[in-house]
Amino acid sequence: EPEVTQTPSHQVTQMGQEVILRCVPISNHLYFYWYRQILGQKVEFLVSFYNNEISEKSEIFDDQFSVERPDGSNFTLKIRSTKLEDSAMYFCASSPRDSNQPQHFGDGTRLSIL
Amino acid sequence: KQEVTQIPAALSVPEGENLVLNCSFTDSAIYNLQWFRQDPGKGLTSLLLIQSSQREQTSGRLNASLDKSSGRSTLYIAASQPGDSATYLCAVKEDSGGSNYKLTFGKGTLLTVNP
């Protein structure tokens, strides 16, 4: 069964550094998402992406964050200048054309900011 | 603003027992509701999706129900097994009339099934 794949599985970065989290969504999916989960807290929506543009973003997704689909397969989340509070599990998800289809999640990238 | 609550926060049962996990949401204008399983340090595995027009969905030993008007869903697990031990998350996809397809999650129920 097709899967959403995320790399790396664990990223350790110094505060203030830029980090790029990578995702390969399922190939025929058209909607892409990033979520995050701070340890012990709920999974929170960050941003949705469709037709090569952001369709919605949460208040968490400030100017430090950006997303890109640089080619036909990858979907990236960039954090420009990381803060300690950015430490979390970041999940990528995708869903097909029909909005009533389930979202499929990757295994996540654990981001640790030192 | 949509809020999703799951109770109980944790549940420990002996193997073989049938159990029910509860999920409630504050805004009934939803597209669908999705139940996920999360193993420690892992991603989210989709278990069941119930459309807003449906009352229930079944997959194997799992049965999910939805009462949209009262803002509630339950996940029923029959004949529980130690391998069912995980955190179970409930998430709703809201119907805002636009391209808003984000999921709003509950905090989850940590299930432990003891052999």
Image (cartoon, rainbow, N blue to C red):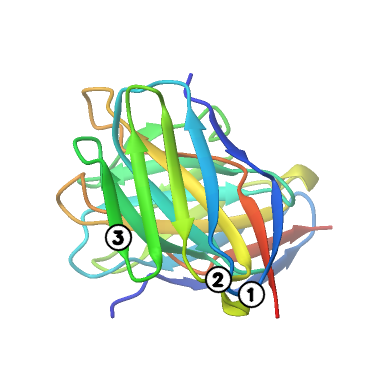
Q: Looking at numbered disc 2 in the image, what kind of residue is underneath it?
A: Ser
Please identify the quarter of the rendering in which residue A17 is found.
bottom right
Distance, label 1 to label 3, CA atoms, is 21 Å
Pinpoint residue A107: horizontal percent, then vertical percent. Answer: 52, 69
If you read the primary sequence from the N terminus, does the residue marked by circle 3 or circle 2 appear first? 3
The answer for which chain carries disc 1 is B
Q: Looking at numbered disc 3 in the image, what kind of residue is underneath it?
A: Thr
Q: Which mark is residue B58?
A: 3
- Classify 10 Å Cα crowding around label 1: few (below 14), some (14-19), many (20 and above): some
Tags 1 and 2 both on a single chain: yes
Q: Looking at numbered disc 1 in the image, what kind of residue is underneath it?
A: Glu
Which residue is located at x 60 percent, y 48 percent?
Answer: B108
Res. A104 visible in picture? no
Looking at the image, is B6 positioned above or below residue A96? above
Pinpoint residue B97: horizontal percent, then vertical percent. Answer: 21, 23
Pinpoint residue B6: horizontal percent, then vertical percent. Answer: 59, 39
Circles 1 and 2 in contact, beta carbons < 8 Å: yes
| Residue underneath mark 1 | B15
If you read the primary sequence from the N terminus, does the residue marked by circle 1 or circle 2 appear first? 1
Camera-nearest label, 1 or 3:
1
Res. B51 visible in picture? yes
Badge 1 marks a residue whose secondary structure is loop
Q: Nearer the viewer, residue B44 or A34?
A: B44
- Classify 10 Å Cα crowding around label 2: few (below 14), some (14-19), many (20 and above): many
The answer for which chain carries disc 3 is B
Which residue is located at x 36 percent, y 32 percent?
Answer: A56
| Residue underneath mark 2 | B80
